[in-house]
Image (cartoon, rainbow, N blue to C red):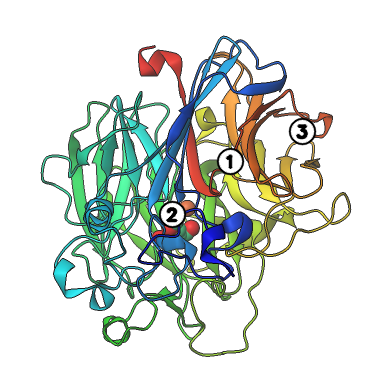
Amino acid sequence: MNDMTIPFATATGLRFPDDIVFRGYAAPSRVEGEVHDLEVEGQIPNELNGAFYRNSADHAYPPLLGKDIFLNGDGMVHMVRFENGHADLKTRYVRTRKFELERKARRALFGAYRNPFTDLAEVAGEDNNTANTSVLWHHGKLYALKESGLPYELDPNTLETLGERNFGGKLNRTFTAHPKLDPETGECIAFAYNAPGQPTRDIELYVISPSGEITSHETFQAPYSSMVHDCLVSRNYIAFLVCPMTCDWERVKKGEPYWHWDSHLKTHVAIIPRKEGVKAIRWYTCPKVAQQTHTFNAWEEQTEAGTTLHLDQFITESGWLSQFPDIRDPNAREKPPFGERWSFDLDSASPEFRMQRLINQIGEMPAIDPRYAMKRANHFWFGTNNPAIGPMLPWGPKGPPFTCVGHFDEAANKLNFWYAGPDSAPEEPHFVPRGPDAAEGDGWILTMVGRRAENRTDLVILDALHLDRGPVAVVKFPYRVHEGFHGIWVGAQALGW
Ligand code: V55
Ligand code: FE
């Protein structure tokens, strides 16, 4: 191929690898910018005032080692600001230490995902955090999060990076990308694993007050060091799954992937009462091979037997083999996640718990009405594929793209889908209530949609309880932004707009 056809080719031959992570629709976007007054098909509801923020991994430079996993891209945050039926887009890289050092050098300096032994000597001891996974809005501040590093605070209006934060010196070197917000107390329940920057069995548990102070910090030990990506919080309990995605520092030193799936390890569940804390921790062992991908919610039910704690989550029975190898079975095939409900009778001494299929449909990227977090929710949304209503899309770097958004109404036992159309891949759904007093589920689902044939992105607004009626509005971006991970909705009032 003629280098002249590559828009960012330089005298030094800056080129991205021609592989699944960097090619075609998955290619880094690298575009920072603003578009005022996006095109809109349909009508953006006037009640939808505020901002949708989401994070993504968008490699700023070709990978040092010639290849990489998409999880290791540089954090790029997108904001769509909604105001009285209008929508404006803003996109900026998070100015992490890694990003700044590499931009100065005009090349990659850091090597493999979370592996300092593959970095160039000139960045020895420097932080490899990409801040690429999620965004948090709490105590009036916006943060970009990645589980292998500290939060980066962003300006919620300009998306400028304000700096790395450790909440008064109380965090070590990591912080989860999936903290949970308590809609009743305003607290943020958060955790960190591998907090010193190396694998350890310790898990740090934090409570952050509505004013941003860490009011509680406790530590407990897991049976082994694992990828603790998400957690579950009910009104009175916190639960963690420790799954066989494990890190062995000796392998990392040899340049092997940070994580490997070891099906000889068991899946363990820790249940911690929020009031008593880790001294009252209780461990359960799961009888099947299980990896939690993401969680819907946790809630308690009072029965004659006492308190039952339910954990509603997506579970797969394999490792995440598109990203990290299986060290026991090189021929293992990745299995899709299903929504499951795991139920624990807390007043019983039994070491057993129940596992049921909650949603009879593969899925991932769960969402509920956030006002129903920590108590029983009836409505569940998720990204999914449904070959009965639309063909699958070609695999991307994280496996099969979604083609549909799904909704499960548990009380009615009904599944409902929106198919995004040919060559269209929805991302994580987000629920926004119609107003503060709206009933559960009465509102909208927002989802980014990759329009693969057009090399563009849309933000689609659906009626949350009637997905199959199709979009209320389609907010059209004039170009492609990179597929992302997790986002949030922040209302105009909270933003002080
Ligand atoms: C996940 C995502 C990550 C990561 C580790 O979804 C786990 C799981 C986007 O980065 O670094
Ligand atoms: Fe996640």
Q: Disc 1 and disc 3: Cα gap in Å? A: 14 Å
The residue at 63%/25% (across/down) is: 440
Placement of 416 over or under 39, stated as above or below: below
The residue at 68%/62% (across/down) is: 400
Q: Going by the image, does 59 lie left or right of 484?
A: left
The residue at 49%/66% (across/down) is: 350
Q: Disc 1 and disc 2: Cα gap in Å? A: 13 Å
Identify which residue, 125 or 354, lies in the foreground: 125
Q: Write down the residue under mark 1.
A: 367
Dot 1 amino acid type: Ala
Q: Write down the residue under mark 2.
A: 230
Residue found farthest to the right: 388
Dot 3 amino acid type: Leu
Q: Secondary structure at mark 3?
A: helix
**Among numbered discs 3 and 2, the one appearing first in the sequence:** 2
Q: In the rendered view of the protein, which quadrant contains the C terminus?
A: top left
Q: Residues within 10 Å of mark 1 (few under 14, many from 20)?
A: many
Residue 145, image x, y percentages: 34, 47
**Among numbered discs 1 and 2, the one appearing first in the sequence:** 2
Residue 272, image x, y percentages: 35, 53
Between circles 1 and 3, the one closer to the viewer is 3
The answer to whether any part of residue 250 appears in the image is yes
Identify which residue, 102 or 466, lies in the foreground: 102
Residue found farthest to the left: 169
Placement of 304 over or under 162, stated as above or below: below
Q: Secondary structure at mark 2?
A: loop
Q: Disc 3 and disc 2: Cα gap in Å? A: 27 Å
Q: Write down the residue under mark 3.
A: 467
Identify which residue, 264 or 364, lies in the foreground: 364
The reply to whether the residue tagged 2 has its Cβ within 8 angstroms of ligand 2 is yes
Residue 367, image x, y percentages: 58, 41
Q: Secondary structure at mark 1?
A: strand
